């Protein structure tokens, strides 16, 4: 697990937008391809194209969504 310098839960590969956490003592970690959020006082998650989401205090796993393509018989990360 590696502590990130920013508080981005996910970045858009195409748009450059990001899901960012804002709050007191918020830490985001990289963990084997996914991310973990530590928000002891809760936080707000913002994105340029979505409404702000209020997150209660706690620790959370931020798992990147995957989609399955039956024609290619392969799973891949959902791209923003």
Image (cartoon, rainbow, N blue to C red):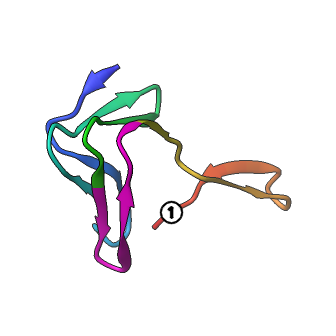
- Left or right? Give the position of 13 relative to 3: right
Residue at 27%, 50% in the rendered image: 8
Q: Is residue 40 above or below residue 2?
A: below
The stretch drawn in magenta includes residue 20: no
Residue 70 is situated, as x and y percent measured from the top left of the image, at 85, 59
Residue 19 is situated, as x and y percent measured from the top left of the image, at 33, 60
The stretch drawn in magenta includes residue 53: yes
Query: How dense is the environment of label 1, judged by Cα within 10 Å: few (below 14), some, or many (20 and up)?
Result: few
Residue 28 is situated, as x and y percent measured from the top left of the image, at 28, 37
- Left or right? Give the position of 12 relative to 44: right
Which residue is more in the foreground, 14 or 61?
61
Q: Can I make out residue 19 in this image?
A: no
Q: Which residues are magenta?
A: 44-58
Q: Quadrant of the N terminus?
A: top left
Which secondary structure lies at badge 1?
Answer: loop
- Left or right? Give the position of 21 relative to 79: left
Q: Can I make out residue 60 in this image?
A: yes
Q: Which residue is mark 1?
A: 79
Residue at 84%, 62% in the rendered image: 71
Residue at 35%, 42% in the rendered image: 57
Which residue is more in the foreground, 23 or 61?
23
Task: Look at the magenta stretch and give its main secondary structure.
Answer: strand
Q: Is residue 23 above or below residue 13?
A: above
Q: Is residue 42 above or below residue 3?
A: below
Q: Quadrant of the C terminus?
A: bottom left
């Amino acid at each position: 697990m590696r502590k990130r310098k920013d508080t981005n839960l996910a970045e858009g590969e195409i748009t450059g937008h990001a899901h960012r956490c804002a709050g007191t003592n918020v830490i985001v970690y990289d963990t084997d391809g996914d991310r973990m959020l530590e928000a002891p006082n809760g936080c707000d998650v913002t994105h340029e194209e979505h409404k702000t989401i209020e997150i209660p205090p706690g620790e959370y796993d931020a798992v990147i969504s995957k989609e399955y393509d039956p024609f290619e018989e392969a799973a891949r990360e959902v791209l923003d």
